[in-house]
C-alpha cells in the first residue's frame, strides 16, 4: 500500500525551506467532524429536503466543516487570472481534514490506513485507499439538482498522468456528475491541470498559497436530473488511488446543494471556476532523491 517512501523527511525539508518565506495571515479553518448530519446540513440549499439520516464512511478526522476558504490570486497557464472565496461548506479528504489549512508547505499527506471504495475504484480503474464517502438521501422540489465544489490535490503536479491520481466522484442516483464541464470525463488531476482543460484549473501552489494542496480546480458546478416524486440519493466520495500517500480533497460550497427549474443564472457563473494550488510534489518514494 505504501509505495512511495520518504514523505516525512521531504515534508520536513519543505517546512524548513519555506519557514523564512513571509506569509499573510490565513483565515481558512477546518473544524473536523465525523457527524454526517452536520456535514449534510452545511451544504444544504433551497428545494432539497434530507430524508432519514445521512451516513459517512471514513476514518476519524477525514471530514470537516470549513470556513473562509480562499484560492489566493492565481494566473492560468493559458492566460487570465482571478481569485475566489468560499465562506463555508463541507470538506472531505483522503487524509486529515485539518491538514488542508495554513500555507502550502509541500502538500497534505497523511496515510489513514483506511479501506477503499468499490465505486471509486471502478471510476479510477485502480485500487483505492482511505475513502471518505458522504451519502445523503433527499427529496427535491424541482427536477434539476446542482451544487458547487472545488477539487484539490497534493498529487499535483508531480503525478499528473500517473495511476496515483486520486479517485473522486459525486454520484446522483448512481451516476457520476463530477465531470469536466462540457465532457463526460471525471474530474481528476489527469483531466484538469495546467495543460489539460486548464480553463478549469487555477495554478500549481507556491509558498504563498493559502492552503496545503499542490493544485486546485476552479469552482465547478455539478448538475443532475432528479425525481420530484421519490427519494433520491447523492453520494460524495474521494479516495487515494494506488497507495495511501498524498491527500486530495473536495470542498463543497455551503448552501449550494439545491434544486431549481430553471437553473439560477448565478450558478452558471461558477462553472468556469477559479484557480489556485501550486505543487512542489516531490514525495512518494521515488521522490526521495530530493533528500
Image: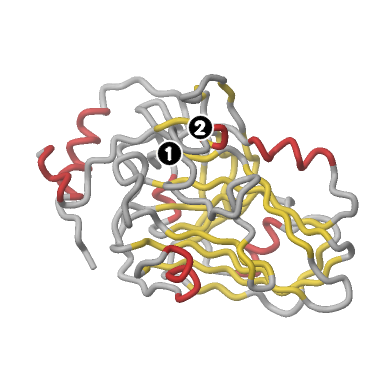
Residue 66 x/y as whole percent: 57, 49
**Cα separation between marks 2 and 1:** 7 Å
| Quadrant of the frame with the C terminus | top left
Q: Nearer the viewer, residue 147 or 268?
A: 268
Going 13% across and 45% down the picture, which residue do you hit? 288
Element assignment for label 2: strand
Residue 61 x/y as whole percent: 44, 63
Question: In which quarter of the view is residue 210 placed?
Answer: top left
Question: In which quarter of the view is residue 44 placed?
Answer: bottom right
**Nearer the N terminus, badge 2 or badge 1?**
2
Going 78% across and 63% down the picture, which residue do you hit? 225
Element assignment for label 1: strand
Q: Which mark is residue 193?
A: none
Residue that numbered label 2 is attached to: 202
Residue 124 x/y as whole percent: 43, 63
How busy is the neighbourhood of tag 2: few (under 14 within 10 Å), some, or many (20 plus)?
Answer: many
Position above or below: 2 against 80: below
Residue 101 in the figure: left or right of residue 228? left
Tell me, yes or no, if residue 129 can be seen here: no
Residue 4 in the figure: left or right of residue 276? left
Residue that numbered label 1 is attached to: 215
Residue 201 x/y as whole percent: 51, 35
Residue 242 in the figure: left or right of residue 68? left
How busy is the neighbourhood of tag 1: few (under 14 within 10 Å), some, or many (20 plus)?
Answer: many
Determine contact: label 2, label 1, CB under 8 Å. yes
Going 50% across and 59% down the picture, which residue do you hit? 168
Going 16% across and 52% down the picture, which residue do you hit? 285
| Quadrant of the frame with the N terminus | bottom left
Amino acid at each position: 500500500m505504501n509505495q512511495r517512501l520518504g514523505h516525512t523527511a521531504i515534508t520536513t525539508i519543505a517546512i524548513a525551506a519555506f519557514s523564512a518565506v513571509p506569509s499573510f495571515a490565513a483565515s481558512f479553518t477546518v473544524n473536523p467532524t465525523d457527524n454526517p448530519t452536520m456535514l449534510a446540513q452545511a451544504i444544504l440549499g433551497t428545494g432539497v429536503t434530507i430524508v432519514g439520516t445521512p451516513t459517512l464512511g471514513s476514518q476519524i478526522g477525514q471530514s470537516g466543516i470549513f470556513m473562509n476558504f480562499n484560492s489566493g490570486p492565481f494566473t492560468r497557464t493559458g492566460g487570465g487570472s482571478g481569485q475566489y472565496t468560499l465562506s463555508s461548506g463541507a470538506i472531505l479528504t483522503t487524509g486529515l481534514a485539518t491538514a488542508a489549512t495554513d500555507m502550502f508547505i509541500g502538500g497534505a499527506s497523511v496515510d489513514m490506513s483506511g479501506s477503499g471504495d468499490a465505486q471509486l475504484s471502478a471510476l479510477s480503474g485502480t485500487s483505492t485507499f482511505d475513502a471518505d464517502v458522504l451519502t445523503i438521501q433527499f427529496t427535491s422540489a424541482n427536477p434539476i439538482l446542482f451544487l458547487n465544489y472545488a477539487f484539490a490535490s497534493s498529487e499535483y503536479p508531480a503525478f499528473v498522468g500517473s495511476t496515483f491520481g486520486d479517485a473522486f466522484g459525486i454520484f446522483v442516483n448512481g451516476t457520476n456528475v463530477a465531470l469536466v464541464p462540457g465532457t463526460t470525463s471525471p474530474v481528476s488531476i489527469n483531466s484538469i491541470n495546467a495543460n489539460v482543460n486548464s480553463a478549469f484549473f487555477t495554478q500549481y501552489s507556491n509558498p504563498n498559497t493559502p492552503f496545503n494542496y499542490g493544485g486546485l480546480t476552479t469552482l465547478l458546478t455539478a448538475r443532475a436530473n432528479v425525481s420530484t416524486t421519490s427519494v433520491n440519493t447523492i453520494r460524495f466520495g474521494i479516495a487515494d488511488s494506488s497507495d495511501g500517500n498524498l491527500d486530495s480533497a473536495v470542498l463543497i460550497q455551503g448552501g449550494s446543494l439545491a434544486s431549481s427549474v430553471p437553473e439560477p443564472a448565478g450558478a452558471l457563473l461558477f462553472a468556469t471556476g477559479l484557480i489556485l494550488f501550486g505543487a512542489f510534489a516531490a514525495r512518494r518514494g521515488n521522490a526521495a532523491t530530493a533528500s
